[in-house]
């Protein structure tokens, strides 16, 4: 378990977790803050889930989440990013691999102008879990990009949802 709470300008948070049942909570308020969360789980049987929650308020904040879960019966991972303000960026990269691998979920909520969200999800293995991505952006000039790749026999389902309100948004 990692909890980070930062207020001010140009703060940096780096959380690196390995093992079972990983949880990272990052809260940053201010301008030009950076959050970096890396979670790796690799087991022969039953690796626990990785969950990362990032909340950023203010302008020009960056959030990066990388989650990798491998092994037989790997549980999967979940990433949640909430950003309010302008010129914020969110990047989520999630990989789950192994036989009977679990579900991968990513949720991004951004309010403000000129925000960007990138989600990349990959699942592989026999009966690999599903990939689920949800992006909600309100404001002008926002951008969302989602890439999902699943392979296996059979691979789980994929669902990507983007909701944008405002002018000049791109998905």
Image (cartoon, grey):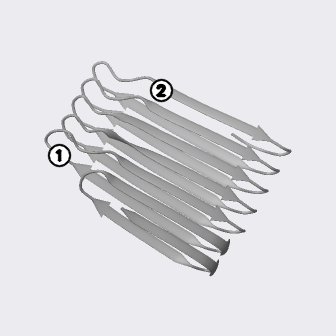
Asked which quadrant contains residue 151, the reply is: top left
Judged left or right of residue 152, residue 159 is right
Which residue occupies the extreme top position in the image? 154
Give the x, y percent position of residue 86.
75, 62
Q: Which residue is mark 2?
A: 158
Asked which quadrant contains residue 19, the reply is: bottom left
Quarter of the figure that contains the C terminus: top right
Q: Which residue is mark 1?
A: 43
Mark 1: few/some/many CA within 10 Å (<14, 14-19, 20+): some
Of residues 130 and 118, which is closer to you in this image?
Answer: 130
* Up/down of 18 relative to 59, above or below: above
Of residues 57 and 38, which is closer to you in this image?
Answer: 57
Judged left or right of residue 8, residue 66 is left
* Up/down of 126 relative to 31, above or below: above
What is the distance, in whole Å, between disc 2 and disc 1 at their CAs? 24 Å
Mark 2: few/some/many CA within 10 Å (<14, 14-19, 20+): some
Which mark is drawn over residue 12? Answer: none
Task: Determine the residue positioned at 43% across, 62% down.
Answer: 37
Task: Determine the residue positioned at 47% across, 65% down.
Answer: 36
Q: What kind of element bears circle 2?
A: strand
Label 2 with label 1: CB-CB less than 8 Å: no
Task: Determine the residue positioned at 55% across, 61% down.
Answer: 63
Judged left or right of residue 44, residue 13 is right
């Amino acid at each position: 378990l990692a909890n980070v709470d930062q207020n001010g300008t140009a703060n940096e948070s780096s959380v690196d977790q390995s093992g079972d049942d990983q949880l990272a909570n990052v809260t940053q308020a201010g301008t030009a803050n950076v959050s970096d969360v890396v979670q790796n789980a690799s087991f022969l049987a039953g690796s626990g889930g990785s969950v990362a929650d990032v909340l950023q308020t203010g302008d020009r904040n960056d959030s990066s989440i990388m989650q990798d879960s491998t092994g037989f019966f790997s549980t999967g991972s979940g990433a949640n990013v909430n950003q309010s303000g302008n010129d914020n960026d969110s990047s989520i990269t999630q990989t789950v691999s192994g036989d009977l691998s679990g579900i991968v979920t990513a949720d991004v909520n951004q309010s403000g102008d000129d925000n960007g969200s990138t989600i990349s999800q990959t699942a592989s293995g026999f009966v690999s879990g599903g990939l689920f991505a949800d992006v909600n952006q309100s404001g002008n000039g926002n951008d969302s990009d989602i890439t999902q790749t699943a392979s296996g026999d059979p691979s789980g389902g994929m669902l990507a949802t983007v909701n944008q309100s405002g002018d000049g948004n791109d998905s």
